[in-house]
Amino acid sequence: MQAGRTPGDETTTFETLLAIAMAAERNAARTYVSLAQTMAAHGRDDIARVFERLADEETRHDREVSDIAVRYDVTAADAATALPMWPRGEAPRLDHDVATNPATSTPYRALAYAVDNEELAFRYYSYAATMAADARTQALAEALAREELGHAALLRSLRREAFHAEGGAEARDSLRLARAISSVDELLRAALTIEEGLVSCLRAAGDGDPVVAALVEDLAAGVASLRDEIPTDSRVPPTSAHAEDRSAVPAEPAAIDAFERAFAFYDAVVHHSRDEATGERAQALAADTLARLLVLRRHAGMAGGARLSA
């Protein structure tokens, strides 16, 4: 799914919604095919295969939506002129350029980019359901939203696999620790170690940069808050597993990579936790980490921040 113009308060009709859905799937398939060709041309066959798979998925989604359109006489011409209107600004987005540039992309980043697109589509269809002109349109929007949510869940699973495949033993240790988190207290102790590592990483990378300094200040305040939440007798990790929590953060001061690893750790806790409170807290930590990661990506892109990434 690809982003387009921001929706206003217009009413969504059944025909318009179908045309938008068709246009979105076809545009996404074309984009992924193009990205696969670009990656292959630059010798990035591993990422080309990811985008080829994504293109196949979007082509399948297109057929499903097209079958519905045929039943209601919504034509391909309608789809060609419709523009997806995914809402913007509702959540941090992973950097498009990093994921689609052969020099910086990885299978993990390509899949993260795809997850982001699916989540944008989900938010649009959820919005469309509230603006539906009638019950039939609302039902279609809700069905499309459920589909996008399912697609995003599958892609998040593939993204986690890609992250841990790319990260080697260090990432596997991080995943093992994420799976072992069974309570909010254990999560907070792990988060304290991770966030302290991120502060150190940023300080090493910052070199007086005001944007990085602001992030350090924000993170340091978060670390202080975490310390206040954790009982004094459990601040020092009592088990060997927690002593290894720093594996979620790489040793070298590569800030963007460090934040990506921290995000993947929290995301894995969300995925594997069977405790609702732990999952919700991990989700909040993941959202904060992703927001900071977006700031770093944008800043590195504008400033050529070589010290921010490996």
Image (cartoon, rainbow, N blue to C red):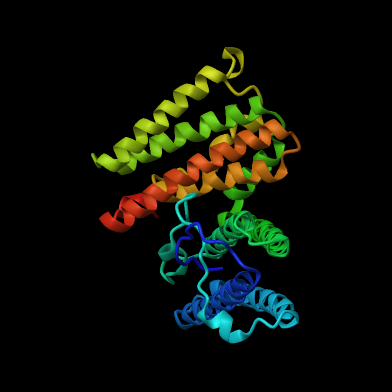
- Considering every residue shown, the one lying at the far top of the view is 233
Q: Quadrant of residue 272?
A: top right
Position of 97 relative to 26 (above/below): above
Residue 254 visible in rendering: no
Quadrant placement of the N terminus: bottom right
**Residue situated in front as seen by the camera: 213 or 45:** 213
Q: Quadrant of residue 49?
A: bottom right
Position of 288 relative to 82 (above/below): above
Q: Position of residue 269 (x, y in %)?
A: 66, 41
Q: Residue at x 53, y 36 (%)?
A: 246
**Residue situated in front as seen by the camera: 250 or 287:** 287
Judge from the rendering whether residue 24 lies leftward or rightward of residue 208; answer left or right.
Answer: right
Q: Position of residue 99 (x, y in %)?
A: 47, 64
Quadrant placement of the C terminus: bottom left
Position of 119 relative to 58 (above/below): above
- Considering every residue shown, the one lying at the far left of the view is 208
Q: Residue at x 32, y 36 (%)?
A: 214
Q: Residue at x 35, y 50 (%)?
A: 308
